[in-house]
Image (cartoon, grey):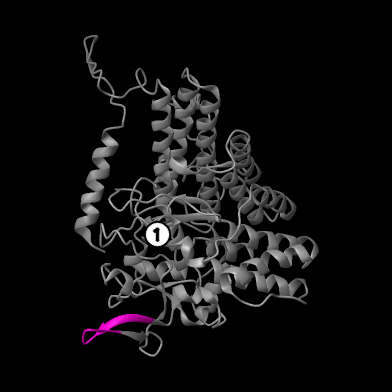
């Protein structure tokens, strides 16, 4: 990974962050220094524009405030860890180092790539908790105010959900009075039921005031559909099948449908959204936070993109193992973006290189297309997909099958995905067990590299077994959860307890 561009972006991010952090006034002998150009609780936020800016700032939490976190393709990225801790991807970059540790589920409280989510998201949750009453106090249009607060609750619920799925129940501050009392003692971890209830409450309250979906300049913000999809995913992990179906039906009623061309969800045609994308990170190739760095991580070093005249930088990192790739039907249209053979240049001519025949560790995972603007060789403006309707359809098929077996409705959902995106024949005649396996396979075929594989394998009871099947030892059930960072335990003086199995 190129260090120079990363250092520059961190510097730019630091400058931007400093510009928005309230600065405490210094005082000596009752003489208080005050700068009216500084942002502080007395002058910000005070207007509708301030409220909009404050809410928009909280969306940086989707990337945890930096280009290399959150929905990034870097090691600390959600989608990356969902791939690298499962059978979905392996990495060329080390042998026995941090990438191998991900695949081996070799976790400990000092493994920064997996523990950093905790501190970052807890801080964003606290920030949101503090911003909500500030916006409530602004004299502005009431409907817009409720929408802004709904967005903040949706983001807070989403960040809590990520924490819960990674670490289990964790202490979060949702009471501004506690937030503003520095002497307050550390909070203990809540029960599972209480944590789930907190997430549900935020999403439910957000749903009541948010529009079905956002378009135009507001595209990329948390909508009712995004909240419902998040709830559906939560219910699936809790195996609350009927609740998941109810949430999925509400998403369906909003009017989403699959994009006619699978690849258009992941190329420059996804700018501004389509009929399928429920939530996306709106990317900018010059942004210090919201940029798409998928292609450098996944492109083989000798990859040549004909349509972009070989413009992209390639670091040659991630591949899908052949045993996973071989689960695909070779007639599956989606293999257009998952390649055994890929274009390269030889003697000035574009030729196809066979990765398997060449001894590579896996197939090329080229899900995101090039940015034709060619603003940056590393960062793309192609939007990052966070949620889309194909995921909802496959979750519906799974939940319906778990409730009542493979009904006609369940078949309709899975076959819609297979026929439109995979261009494959419809399934029929399966019993409940066979349908369950079919859905599990289809979720791999459809959603690889989109951040769902870890949750899926955990839900199906296959997460730990996958690591064992790959020959890793010392793999136990406690590894389903990440450890909390050691600092969180130490700074709480033991009030916050570590997840079982970690020192």
Residue shown at 44%/66% (left/top)? 106
Label 1: few (<14), some (14–19) or many (≥20) C-alpha neighbours in 10 Å: some
Residue 492 seen in this snapshot: no
Residue lying furthest top: 30
Which x, y percent locates residue 425? 66, 77
Return the residue nearer the eye: 34 or 172: 34
Return the residue nearer the eye: 123 or 386: 386
Q: Is residue 42 above or below residue 232?
A: above
The residue range painted magenta reads 342-350
Residue shown at 75%/53% (left/top)? 242
Left or right of residue 223: residue 245: right
Indicate yes or no whether the magenta region holds residue 348.
yes
Which x, y percent locates residue 210? 57, 36
Q: Main secondary structure of the magenta part?
A: strand
Which x, y percent locates residue 337? 45, 73
Dividing the picture into quadrants, the one containing residue 390 is bottom right
**Which residue is disc 1 drawn over?**
268
Dot 1: element: helix
């Amino acid at each position: 990974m190129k260090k120079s561009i990363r250092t520059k972006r961190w510097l730019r991010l630091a400058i931007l962050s400093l510009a928005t952090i309230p600065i405490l006034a210094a005082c000596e002998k009752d003489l208080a220094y005050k700068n009216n150009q500084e942002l502080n609780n007395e002058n910000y936020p005070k207007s509708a524009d301030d409220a909009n800016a404050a809410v928009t700032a909280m969306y940086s939490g989707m990337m945890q405030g930096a280009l290399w976190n959150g929905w990034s393709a870097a090691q600390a990225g959600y989608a990356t860890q969902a791939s690298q801790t499962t059978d979905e991807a392996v990495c060329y970059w080390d042998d026995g180092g941090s990438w191998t540790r991900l695949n081996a589920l070799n976790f400990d409280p000092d493994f920064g790539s997996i523990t950093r989510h905790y501190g970052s998201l807890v801080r964003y949750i606290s920030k949101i908790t503090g911003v909500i009453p500030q916006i409530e106090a602004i004299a502005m249009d009431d409907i817009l105010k409720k929408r802004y607060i709904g967005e903040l609750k949706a983001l807070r619920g989403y960040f809590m959900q990520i924490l819960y799925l990674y670490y289990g129940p964790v202490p979060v501050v949702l009471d501004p009075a506690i937030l503003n009392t520095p002497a307050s003692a550390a909070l203990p971890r809540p029960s599972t039921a209480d944590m789930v209830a907190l997430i549900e409450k935020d999403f439910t309250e957000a749903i009541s005031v948010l529009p079905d979906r956002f378009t135009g300049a507001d595209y990329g913000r948390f909508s009712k559909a995004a909240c419902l999809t998040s709830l559906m995913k939560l219910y699936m992990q809790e195996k609350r099948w009927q609740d998941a179906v109810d949430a999925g039906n509400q998403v369906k009623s909003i009017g989403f449908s699959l994009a006619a061309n699978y690849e258009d969800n992941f190329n420059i045609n996804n700018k501004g959204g389509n009929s399928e994308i429920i939530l996306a990170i709106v990317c900018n190739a010059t942004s210090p936070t919201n940029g798409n760095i998928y292609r450098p991580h996944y492109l083989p070093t000798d990859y040549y993109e004909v349509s972009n005249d070989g413009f992209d930088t390639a670091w040659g990192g991630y591949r899908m193992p052949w045993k996973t790739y071989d689960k695909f039907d070779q007639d599956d249209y989606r293999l257009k973006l998952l390649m055994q053979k890929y274009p390269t240049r030889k003697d000035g001519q574009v030729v196809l290189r066979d990765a398997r025949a060449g001894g590579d560790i896996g197939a090329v995972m080229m899900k995101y297309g090039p940015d034709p603007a060619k603003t940056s060789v590393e960062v793309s403006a192609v939007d990052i997909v966070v949620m889309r309707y194909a995921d909802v359809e496959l979750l519906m098929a799974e939940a319906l099958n778990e409730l009542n077996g493979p009904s006609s409705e369940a078949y309709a959902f899975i076959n819609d995905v297979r026929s439109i995106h995979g261009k494959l024949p419809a399934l029929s005649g399966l019993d409940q067990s066979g349908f369950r396996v079919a859905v599990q396979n289809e979720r791999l075929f459809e959603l690889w590299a989109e951040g769902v594989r870890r949750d899926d394998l955990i839900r199906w009871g296959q997460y730990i077994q996958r690591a064992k099947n790959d020959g890793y030892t010392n793999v136990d059930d406690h590894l389903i959860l990440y450890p909390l960072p050691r600092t969180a335990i130490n700074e709480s003086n033991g009030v916050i307890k570590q997840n079982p199995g970690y020192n």
